[in-house]
Amino acid sequence: MKVRCRLVVLGLAVACSVAMGIHYDAMFEDRWPYPTDNELAKNYDAHVGKETFLFGTVTSVGDRVVHVQVDARGETYTVRVRSFDAAVRPGGTVQVLGVVRPDRVLAADRVVVVESSRESRLYKFGVSILGAGLVLVTVFRYWQIDTAGLTLEAKDG
């Protein structure tokens, strides 16, 4: 009976998580305060003067100006970001909050570097995998799985 109850509770938790994810996705664009990357890809000039928030990959770096490639659903476009003061190399990923200007120019108010280069992504995933491995080794060093009861139990000794 305990196993059945645990499986029902687990199923309900998973179902609730999936339902919240579906609701979030359905409401995302209605609640997003900025023009989305898709809206900018379809009609850039209609959003000139508005503030926006974009994610993109740096394609070239100049003096306080970078070119950022934005991947909208089904379409890719490049914007030139002015007032860029973050250290990043081509291939890095950035978040840019700024004002849309004519001719695919974005006047940046704030720039956050997510990944400074392609190599930083490998480092990030490598450290994450190493950390997860250490956690699993530590857990299973002191605990064991009881498959009959679907529980973790402390090892003897």
Image (tube, helix red, strand yellow):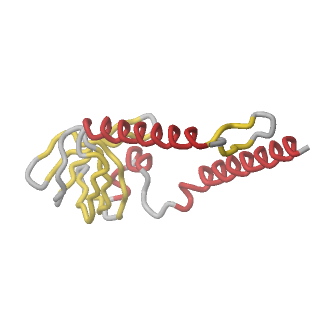
31, above or below 91, in the image: below
Q: In percent of the image, x 76 and y 46: which residue is there?
A: 10
Q: Residue at x 53, y 55 (%)?
A: 29
Q: Quadrant of residue 72?
A: top left
Could you tell me residue 39's position as x and y percent?
43, 50
Residue that protrudes farthest toward the front in the picture: 157
What x and y, as percent, mark residue 45?
Answer: 33, 53
The residue sitting at 14% across, 45% down in the picture is 61
Q: Nearer the viewer, residue 117 or 125?
A: 125
Q: Nearer the viewer, residue 156 or 65?
A: 156
Q: Is residue 96 above or below residue 71?
A: below
Establish if 118 lies above or below 15: above
Quarter that holds the C terminus:
top right
Q: x and y percent of residue 146 in the render?
A: 74, 37
- With 134 as the anchor, is 61 left or right in this view? left
| Left-right relation of 72 to 109 | right
In-front residue for pair 113/149:
149
Please identify the quadrant where the N terminus is shown: top right
**In this picture, residue 12 sits left or right of residue 29:** right
Q: Position of residue 125 (x, y in %)?
A: 38, 38
The residue at the far left in this view is 63
The residue located at (32%, 39%) in the rendering is: 121
